[in-house]
Amino acid sequence: MDAAPPTTKAQVHIHLKALECLQQVNGKLPINVKILMKAKRKSGSVSLWNYVQKNKEKLKADALIVSDTSMLGKGVPSITYGLRGLNYYQIELTGPERDLHSGVYGGAVPNPLTIFDGAVRETSRQNFRVTVPAFMTG
């Protein structure tokens, strides 16, 4: 079966219907739910990024569901899980104003880049398993 063209309408709908079902069964939702939808899919979502930056506290959550997935086929809405995504970070390292790699300070003052390298190496092992507690399970 060929995958249907990418669209999020059915996936958003299936999540909303799942919430509706939970509410009907329990009389209320058993969790606090925040729904954030965007419509500018092809334009880079600059306005969404600005909104998120200005409302970080309001948007705090324990979990996130993204509906930007395809369907198995026409008329077959799908709930996809286990996707990978991208995160971008900007890290600023600071250290001494001058090079301290040799002389009186040689070896006594660690290089900030060396410390950062060690921290990054500690987040995963050779088998590419992440070592940060609860990273893989949430």
Image (cartoon, rainbow, N blue to C red):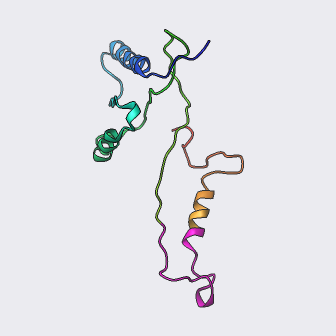
Magenta span: 93-114
108 sits left or right of 7 in the view: right
Where residue 102 sits, quadrant-wise, is bottom right
Q: Nearer the viewer, residue 63 or 3?
A: 3
Can you give x and y, in whole percent of width and height, for residue 135 in the image?
54, 43
Can you give x and y, in whole percent of width and height, for residue 50 in the image?
31, 44
Where residue 23 sits, quadrant-wise, is top left
Residue at 57%, 80% in the rendered image:
109
Name above or below for residue 133 compared with residue 64.
below
**Magenta stretch: residue 103 in it?**
yes
Q: Nearer the viewer, residue 48 or 13?
A: 48
Q: Nearer the viewer, residue 79 or 44?
A: 44
User: Does residue 32 appear anywhere in the picture?
Assistant: no
**Magenta stretch: residue 50 in it?**
no
The dominant secondary structure in magenta is loop
46 sits left or right of 87 in the view: left
Residue at 33%, 38% in the rendered image:
48
